[in-house]
Amino acid sequence: MQRVYKQGMALTDLTPAGFLEAANAKFFGPKMQDVMRLDAGSFDGPLAVGIWGVEKGEFELVYTASEFVTVLSGRVIVTAGGKSHELGPGDVCFTPKGETVRWNVLEEVRKAFIVVS
């Protein structure tokens, strides 16, 4: 089934994910709630595609797979390898497997993702 996201659409079909805790994210402040919709593939397989979101806050994690994202809404500062980038709607980012990334979520974020093991 084809899934379409148009800028400004409400994402009402996201469900609690618990990804950050499962990925052993290090939180800087209160633990954050994350939500997700998996559209294709599986995190146990070679490919996963969907939409993920997280509330305001800060965390750091080591990527166990490579990920390509497009920010749909919100603002975040991502820091890896000593370099920081502020991302907002329409911005894209690639993170290779093994990279440690710190996310400083300035505004609740929603992103489309493609994860490749």
Image (cartoon, rainbow, N blue to C red):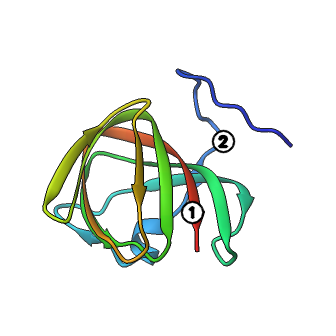
C-alpha distance separating marks 1 and 2:
20 Å
Left of 63 or right of it: where is 68?
right
Could you tell me which quadrant the C terminus lies in?
A: bottom right
Element at label 2: loop
Residue 69, placed above or below residue 3: below
Left of 12 or right of it: where is 66?
left
Q: Residue at x 28, y 43 (%)?
A: 76
Camera sees residue 106: no
Element at label 1: strand
Residue 24 place in picture, x, y as percent: 36, 78
Q: Residue at x 33, y 72 (%)?
A: 99
Left of 72 or right of it: where is 99?
left
For marks 1 and 2, the one nearer the N-term is 2
Looking at the rendered structure, the kind of residue marked 2 is Asp
Residue 96 place in picture, x, y as percent: 41, 67
The label nearer to you, 1 versus 2, is 1
Looking at the rendered structure, the kind of residue marked 1 is Val
Name, please, the residue furthest toward the top: 8
Label 1 packing within 10 angstroms: few (<14), some (14-19), many (20+): many
Q: Residue at x 70, y 69 (%)?
A: 42
Front residue of this view, candidates 94 and 20: 94
Front residue of this view, candidates 15 and 38: 38
Residue at mark 2: 13
Label 2 packing within 10 angstroms: few (<14), some (14-19), many (20+): few
Residue at mark 1: 115
Front residue of this view, candidates 92 and 104: 92
Residue 77 place in picture, x, y as percent: 23, 46
Could you tell me which quadrant the N terminus lies in?
A: top right
Q: Which quarter of the picture shows residue 109?
A: top left
Residue 62, placed above or below residue 39: below
Camera sees residue 36: yes
